[in-house]
Image (cartoon, coloured by chain):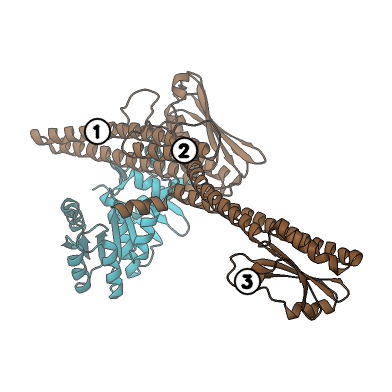
Amino acid sequence: MRALIVEDDKKIASFLIKGLKQEGFAVDYAVNGEDGLHLALHEPYDVAIVDIMLPKLDGLSLIEEMRRNKVNTPVLILSAKRTVDDRIKGLQSGGDDYLIKPFAFSELLARVQALIRRATGATEPTHITISDLSMDLLRREVTRSGKRIDLLPLDYALLEYLMRNAGRVVSKTMIMEHVWNYNFDPGTNVVEARVCSLREKIEKGFGKKLIHTVKGFGYVLREDK
Amino acid sequence: MFFERINKFRRSLAFRLTLFYTTMFTISSFIAFLIFYEIMTLSIHNRTDNSLKEKAKEFSLLIASKGIGSLKEEMIHEANAIGPDKVFFRCLTMDGEEIISSDIGPWRNTGVSRIALKHMGQGKPLLETLKLPGVKYKVRVLYEIAGPEIVVHIGQTLKEDEDLFKEFREVFRTGMTIVLVLATLGGWFMARRALSGVEEVTKTAVAISEGAMENRVPLSGRGDEIDRLAGVFNHMLNRIQSLMIEMREVTDNIAHDLKTPITRIRGLTEIALTREKSLDEYQTMAESIAEECDRLSAMINTMLDISETKAGVRTLDVDEVDLSALVKEAGDLFQPLAKERGLQVELNTPPQCLLQGDKGKLQRVFANLLDNAIKYTPTGGSITVAFKEYPKEVAISVSDTGIGISSEEIVHIFDRFFRADGSRSQPGAGLGLSLVRAIVRRHGGEIKVNSSPGAGSTFTVVLPRIKSQL
C-alpha cells in the first residue's frame, strides 16, 4: 500500500510517517501543496492524507486539482477546523473523509483502511473470527469455542467495533462516537463499565483474555501470544 | 480640505433638514402672499371700474334731466375737482365725434376706439385698460351709452392703484427676505435640537471605540425617538459589556484549566527526560500524557460547543425525535456503570414522546445529566428519570439521592467552569451543565434545578413539543 502525506507541520508528519510505516505502508511526504499535487498526479497512491492549511497551494485546491486531472485516489482531509461547514466544503471539493485535529493515530488508521477498502471494493466480510471468538455479522450471533453468547445490542455493537479493529487500539472517545453515536465527554468511567460488562460475557469461563486495556488510551482486542 | 468640509456639511442631516424646512416654508409663504396680492389687485380694479360706472350713470341721469347742455360745466368742474391730469370726461356721438369734454389737454393722445363704438351699437358698456405713449401709468377707460346717440367716454389714470401695488410688492419683497432668514434660522435650530440626541449617541460611540467602555448616553427623559434610540443603545452597550466580562472570566478560566494539564504533561516529560527509567515506567508516563491530552482536547471541544450553541452559529439538525427512546438508550448506556457502583436507575418513560429537536444534542443533554447524577451519588443511592407531558411541552426530570448542591452553589451551577466541590482537580468537569443549558435553551426550553444538600438533586428539563424556529 502506498500513502501520500501532505502536511506542513513536520512533527505531525513524522508521527504519521512512523505510524503508517509500522502498519506496512510505503509513505511519500510533501511539505506544501504544490509538491503534494505534483506527487499525487505522477505517482499511483492507494490513499492520500492532506492537511487543509498548506503553504503554496491549500488542501482543498489540491484535491480539486487532483479530481480535475482524473486522479481518484481516496483522500482523508486533516483539519483543525471543526464546523459542519468546513467538513461539507472538504467533502464537496472531492475529499472522501474528514478528520479533526487533534486525533488519535488509531482513528486515522481505521479511516485510512476504510477508505482503501471502499476504493478497492473489497467485499464486506460476513464473519469475523479472532482466536476462538467468532461473530456472524449477518445473523448477529456471537460464539466462543462454539458456545453461543447472548449480547445486548449495545454490547454487540461494541464487540463488533473491537473485532473489526482487532489488533488496533481504539480510544474511549472513538467508542463513544462510533459505537454508540454519543458525542459527549463523560465525567464518569461509563465506557470502562461497559467494556467490563462485555468482558464478563465473552471472557468469563473461557480462560483466555481477548480485550486488553491500553491505559490512558483505550482498548484493543487481540489474541495474546 | 475646505471643499471636503463643505461636502461633509452638505451631506449632514441637519443641513438637509434645514434646507427642506426653509424651502417648504418659503414656498408656502410665497403662495400665501401671491394669493393675497391677486385678491387685492382684483378688488382694487373692481373698485375703480365701479366708480367709473357710477360716474357714467350720474352723467346719463344729468343728460336725461337737464339735457346735454348742462353737462359740459359739470364735467369740467368734476375733472378739476379730481385733477385734470388724473381724469377726463367727454361725450361722443355714435360715430366718435366729440360733443363736449372736460379739459382734454393731458389726454390728447387718447383716441376713440372704433371697436368700442361698434360695441356701443349693441348697447353694452365697455371697459379697457390703455397704455398711452409717453405716459407712465396705465389708463382705465369706460365707454357707455348715456342718452340717445350719446356715448360717455371716461378715462382715469391708474397711478394711485399702481403706486399701491408697487408699495405692496416692496413690502412683499422685504417680508419674503425676512421669512427666508427666519425659516433658515428656525429650521437650523430645530434640526440641531432634534439631532442633538444623535450627536450625544455619536459622541458616546466615539468615546467607546476609543476604549471608554463604561460610557453611556445621557437620557433626556423626553421619551422621544432619540431618547428611545439612546435607551436601546445603552442597553446594547450593557449587553456587550457583560458579554465582555463573561468572556474575560471564561478566558481566565480556560487559561487556568489549560495550564493545569499542560503543567502535568510538562512535569511528566521532564521526569522522563531527567533520569533513566525502566520501559514500564516510560510506558506509564506516556499513558498518563495521552490521557491528559485527551482530556484537554475534550475540554476544548466542549467549550467550543458551548460557545457555538450559545451564539447559535451552528444550526440545529432538527428532526422528529422520540425522547422516550432517547432517554431509554441513555439509561441503558449507563446501566453497567450504575450496577458497578451499586446504584438503582429507574426510568419511568412513556411508550413514546415525540418532539422536534436535534437528536445528537438532546442525547448529550440526558447523557450529561445521567453522568452527573451517577458521579455525585454514593453507593446504595438511586436515580430516577420521570416524564411529565403537557399539551405544549414535556418536562423530564432526573433525580438522584446524591450529595446535593448548597444554595450558594446552586445559582452558579450552570456557569461555565463552576464546580460545586470548589476544586479544579478534574478539568472540564465544570462544562457539562453549561453545555446542557445552552442546548436546552437553543431548543426553546429551560432547565431548572432543585436540591437539598445531603438529600439529592433534581434537574428538570422542559422542552417545547413544537418549536417552529430553531
Across and down, in percent, residue B139 comes to: 67, 66
In primary-sequence order, the first of circles 2 and 3 is 3
Give amino acid for label 3.
Leu
Label 2 packing within 10 angstroms: few (<14), some (14-19), many (20+): many
Q: Nearer the viewer, residue B249 or B205?
A: B205
Residue position marked by numbered label 3 in the rendering = B132
Label 1 marks a residue whose chain is: B
Which kind of residue does numbered mark 1 sit on? Lys
Q: Which of marks 3 and 1 is in front?
A: 3
Q: What element carries label 3?
A: loop
For residue B197, the mark is: 2
Q: Residue B259 carries which label?
A: 1
The quadrant where residue A192 appears: top left
Q: Residue B143 appears in which quarter of the rendering?
A: bottom right
Query: The residue tagged with tag 2: helix, strand or loop?
Result: helix
Indicate left or right for B72 with B268 as reference: right
- The local crowd at label 1, few if under 14, some if 14 to 19, many if 20 or more residues have their Cα within 10 Å, is few
Q: Label 2 amino acid?
A: Gly
Q: Position of residue B283 (x, y in %)?
A: 18, 39
Q: Which of marks 1 and 2 is nearer the N terminus?
A: 2
Q: Distance between the residues labelled 3 and 1?
A: 109 Å
Chain assignment, label 3: B
Say the numbered circle drawn on residue B405. Answer: none
Give residue B30's position: percent from left, percent from top.
59, 55
Chain that bears disc 2: B
Q: How far apart are marks 2 and 3 (CA)?
A: 65 Å
